[in-house]
Amino acid sequence: MPVCRLTIEYDGSRFSGWQVQPDCRTVQGELKKALATVMREPVDLQGAARTDAGVHALGQVASFEAQALPDPERLARSVSALAGPDVAVTEAALAPDGFNARFDATGKRYCYAVLSRPTPSPLFARTSWFVPRPLDLGAMRAAARVLVGTHDFAGFRSSDCGRKTTERTMARVEISEHERGLVTIDVEGTAFLKNMVRIMAGTLVAVGHGRFPPDVTARLLETKDRTKAGPTAPPHGLTLVEVLYPEGGLRRR
């Protein structure tokens, strides 16, 4: 059966996360309603990442099967028009048979934005964590370097995380400074535990404020003690930038 792959952008501020929930407005829920209208039948929409309430996306990916698919450009325009002003399908394309946005993904890239300056910004308020104190970026970079590679990240997950295995591989954890006090923490990995990127960001900001020494990340990887990490950074600073797939779009089965 034909498979359609959607690339989706959204402002998560007014959503209760990606996944459909009873009596809540969710990204998946709004898209499924719009797709049912356009396709004239219900669709089973599979998302690559289950982003939390308040988290944004530039490159979320979702897929669904259908007996017949309309023109991809028309599909993207129509669904975007129906889904509301805070979510848009930026691309629709025919995917290989059997493609699944979630299970064929080989990695994800996230960006956590921190606004580090004395005064807040009306423009960045919905997409960054405002911290008025200056940050020691050198200390943060030293702490971030330790997180690259394959480690047990049990110390960087929420207490209600249900994953049985906590070993993950991070290809990149980089900190960049931009104009107007914006600092970004870019993370790329094969998979993530619940709230992992936000706990990493909260810990690195705590290092930047001098609350922890840079070697705190090494100690957390060793002890796996979440209580010794920094706070869970607020969701609105986090954006899913890209979902990664193998060449051809399908994992080997």
Image: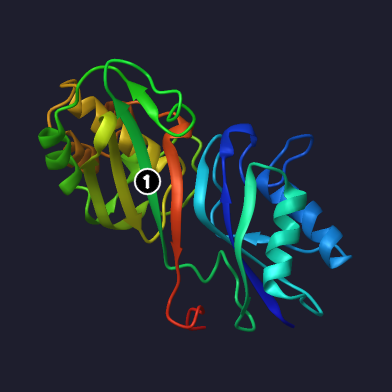
Q: Secondary structure at mark 1?
A: strand
* Quarter assignment of residue 119: top left
Q: Which residue is mark 1?
A: 111
* Quarter assignment of residue 199: top left
Between 94 and 210, the one nearer to me in the picture: 94
Between 139 and 231, the one nearer to me in the picture: 139
Image side of residue 208 versus residue 167, left or right: left
Is residue 188 at least partly visible in the picture? Answer: yes
Up the image or down, 110 lies above or below 121; here it is below
Image side of residue 196 versus residue 67, left or right: left
Is residue 159 at least partly visible in the picture? Answer: no
Q: How many marks?
A: 1
- Residue 232 % position (x, y): 39, 29
Residue sitting at x 80%, y 52%? 33
Image side of residue 128 versus residue 37, left or right: left
Quadrant of the snapshot with the N terminus: bottom right
- Residue 101 % position (x, y): 57, 67
Up the image or down, 57 lies above or below 42; here it is above
* Quarter assignment of residue 230: top left
Q: Amino acid at mark 1?
A: Cys
Residue sitting at x 89%, y 65%? 40
Residue sitting at x 45%, y 44%? 239
**Protein image colouring:** rainbow
Between 79 and 222, the one nearer to me in the picture: 79
